Amino acid sequence: MGSLTERQKAIIIGCLLGDGSMRCKDNALLEINHSFKQKAYVDWKYEQLKRIVPTAPKKRFGNKDRIAYRFTTKSIPELTGIYKRFYTRRKKVIPDDLIITDLSLAIWLMDDGSKSYRTVYFNTQKFDMRDQRKLIKLLGSQHAIKAKVNKDKEYWRLRVAVESVGRLSKIVKPHILPCLIYKLPL
């Protein structure tokens, strides 16, 4: 991960906790893909990572009326190390030694967070129960944030305890883009 800055690593980790995905042949690349409604957020991510991104974000028309806005980084060895930590048999997993910085936590919230009245959910349905419990432990040990799994229809996600929402907000607020502040109960 030599040529990536600590800030870029934190952003990438936050993306991988959220909506980001990676692919790897000889070297790995990161794909950022959000709804076109999140254009400002994608443009911000691009500005943060543009040193490793060959082309600016583009609109992409998907199934039905979905319009995405996305970019892909170069395939580089620095990303391959991250890929090997976060992927097992092409499935995204949570590394045992993961450090979730304040910035990574904010990116994760902007990607996959949602508020519901006085609490916040992290839409972690893509992770198995073992990884979700690992995330709960990491939130508690690294940020003193209490969370638990919560059933969302047939899948599980993380729910931040109401008493920890203020702590979460204090940690992430300096990093949250104005267009995504609605994800926090104020």
Image (cartoon, rainbow, N blue to C red):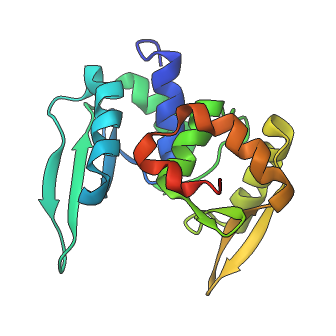
133, above or below 101, in the image: below
Instruction: Name which residue lies at 18% across and 41% down.
Output: 57
Question: Residue 8 versus residue 77: which sits nearer the camera?
Answer: 8
Is residue 48 at least partly visible in the picture? yes
User: Could you tell me residue 49's position as x and y percent?
Assistant: 33, 27
Q: Quadrant of residue 114?
A: bottom right
Is residue 26 at least partly visible in the picture? no
20, above or below 158, in the image: above
Instruction: Name which residue lies at 26% across and 25% down.
Output: 50
User: Could you tell me residue 85's position as x and y percent?
Assistant: 57, 38
Left or right of 97? Residue 45 is left
Question: Residue 61 versus residue 134: which sits nearer the camera?
Answer: 61
Question: Residue 186 versus residue 7: which sits nearer the camera?
Answer: 186
User: Could you tell me residue 92's position as x and y percent?
Assistant: 52, 54
User: Could you tell me residue 35's position as x and y percent?
Assistant: 29, 60
Q: Quadrant of residue 177?
A: top left
Left or right of 158? Residue 178 is left
